Amino acid sequence: MWSRRTLIGAISIGTLIGFAVPAAAQETYIPLISKGFQHQFWQAVKTGAEQAAKDYNVRITFEGPDSETMVDKQIDMLSAALAKNPKAIGFAALDSQAAIPLLRKAQTAKIPVIAFDSGVDSDIPLSTAATNNLAAAALAADKMAELIGGEGDIALVVHDQTSRTGIDRRDGFVNRIKEKYPKINIVSIQYGSGDHLKSTEITKSVLQANPKLKGIFGANEGSAIGVVNGAREMNRKVVIIGYDSGKQQKQAIQEGLMAGAITQNPVGIGYKTVEAAVKALKGEKLEKIIDTGFFYYDKSNMSDPKIAAVLYD
Amino acid sequence: MTTIVEKETPTVIKSTVFSQGAWQRILAFASLIALMAVFTIASDNFLQPDNLIGILQATAVNGVLAVAATFVIITGGIDLSVGTLMTFCAVIAGVFLTYWGLPMPVGILAAIAAGAICGSVSGTLIAKMKIPPFIATLGMMMLLKGLALVISGTRPIYFNDTPNFPMISQESLLGAILPFLPIPNGVLILFVVAVASSLVLTRTALGRYTFALGSNEEAVRLSGVNTDFWKIIVYTVSGGICGIAGLIIASRLNSAQPALGQGYELDAIAAVVIGGTSLSGGRGTILGTIIGALIISVLTNGLRILSVAQEWQTVVTGVIIILAVYADILRRKG
């Protein structure tokens, strides 16, 4: 009984101390609470943040929940981050309203908050470093229209219907088609949680149901790869436009399976967030919105240094 | 016949709850204290009032869900639908309060009733239609996830028209009376649910039958007890408790998030198992479950406070769960 208890204790203490990062007293610590963690996109944001941390000599941590639906887990992360006496905080809200009480707490404690990726509907964040998803998805719609010749049936595979990016990319795309291209018909909008396999199956059923389909827009990395896989498995030639990058998507564009994709600047998002936090700590005035930019890329401009710099594997 | 069972089962309960259960609770409690001690030594930021309150608040939802799961697991069943049922109930509260503009007590009752009704459906599938609990609740998990999205129109429902709604979990009644103890109401609700459930399990006929179903269902049935009826009641109670969890999470987020919920059943089951409740049924305590839920929250929070890389946080949590259950197995063998 005792020996086992001690055993557990000893192992857990060992494990913990092994991984614990000793906290130095004098450094500037800025935690970033992101919307996700495992996707390559978030890893690229993290890379940018780490780069800025090095340049400005601050310490950062980067955390996010396993899935973009876990609003309460993200709140717990924010709460733990606040307990660590940070100098500033970077935050990408899954749901703005849910985070307001904690953001108020940060405000009261005079901890500057910088929003990133998607905005926080509140005046607490001093600045927001984000992509204009509505405009970016509208650009995807223009490219789609151009590539299918301005008429025909198309479909969308979107990651989800509740998150800000899901809604903005869907609406940005759909609204542009409705406004400018009356001969293009959106026959289906499906949601696949950004999961490769689920999006593949969805794509196959959309293709099955619509033999005349000319194009599909995949609204994030996982959705886009699912669309490519689905079209390949069904052996169908359709115009595919994706979003973000990643090794598989880049390869699909190089092989001609995918026409092109919108890329955000995730490294820039991470970098600008930390940079803005540092500026806030120095008391500099910040722009309310830092547009981190987006590009359309395809085979022809992928190796252009300006584009290559923002693509990630 | 019934009288014989009622005489016999309490002795079964006594031997399971008070002797074995007591040791398990001490073991689990010791692990909790040990964990807290480690984190306190490792970081000055851990043992701060704000952070401890944060830990408790993070435990409220999982704790209540774990209590709901404890009932079902003691009968030898499993409930995979607790997470999405919680979400479904939160959405129901949103529909009643925000869409229909009904008064807050009505919304609260509706959420709990929705939970109880869904629980009774699961119970009926399992008891009357003989669908294995794993499959029946897996089906319910997906069904409820879908319904929550359909009913909410796939958008979060905000409670801005019900200004008192955030009070349910965020504000602190206790803090108003005792300013040095600003424990949020959500945690108080967990406490009340836990105490009430513990009393039900140890002091009532429902509790006796819950244990008896998990120990030897056939014997209970042969002695003339309507096991189907009691099983449905257990799932109904469990569902109602999920409704309470739905209210806590909706109040904390000031919104019903329809896409949330899947995956929460695993955290709840982990808390139950760490707390010493046997997955094969017939044995378990609510106190153990609460300690299990606290261990998970302390671990998650502590690793974050120490800025342990996120991928390693998951690894460590997995190791701790395996160790906790293995220690329980060792103890019972020896």
Image (tube, coloured by chain):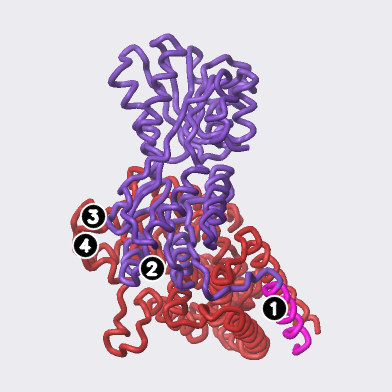
Q: Look at the numbered discs 1 and 4 and tell me whether their residues touch, using CB distance below 8 Å.
A: no
Q: At 48% from the left edge and 53% from the top edge, which residue is drawn?
A: A34
Which tint is chain B? red
Residue at mark 3: B98
Q: At 47% from the left edge and 61% from the top edge, which residue is drawn?
A: A73
Q: Position of residue A200 (x, y in %)?
A: 58, 31
Q: Look at the numbered discs 3 and 4 and tell me whether their residues touch, using CB distance below 8 Å.
A: yes
Residue at mark 4: B162
Chain letter for mark 3: B
Quadrant in the picture for the N terminus of chain B: bottom right
Q: Identify which amino acid the numbered label 1 is placed on.
A: Ile
Which one is nearer the viewer's eye here, A100 or A282? A282
Q: Position of residue B110 (x, y in %)?
A: 30, 62
Q: Main secondary structure of the magenta part?
A: helix
Q: Residue furthest right?
A: B334
Q: At 34% from the left edge and 12% from the top edge, which residue is drawn?
A: A183
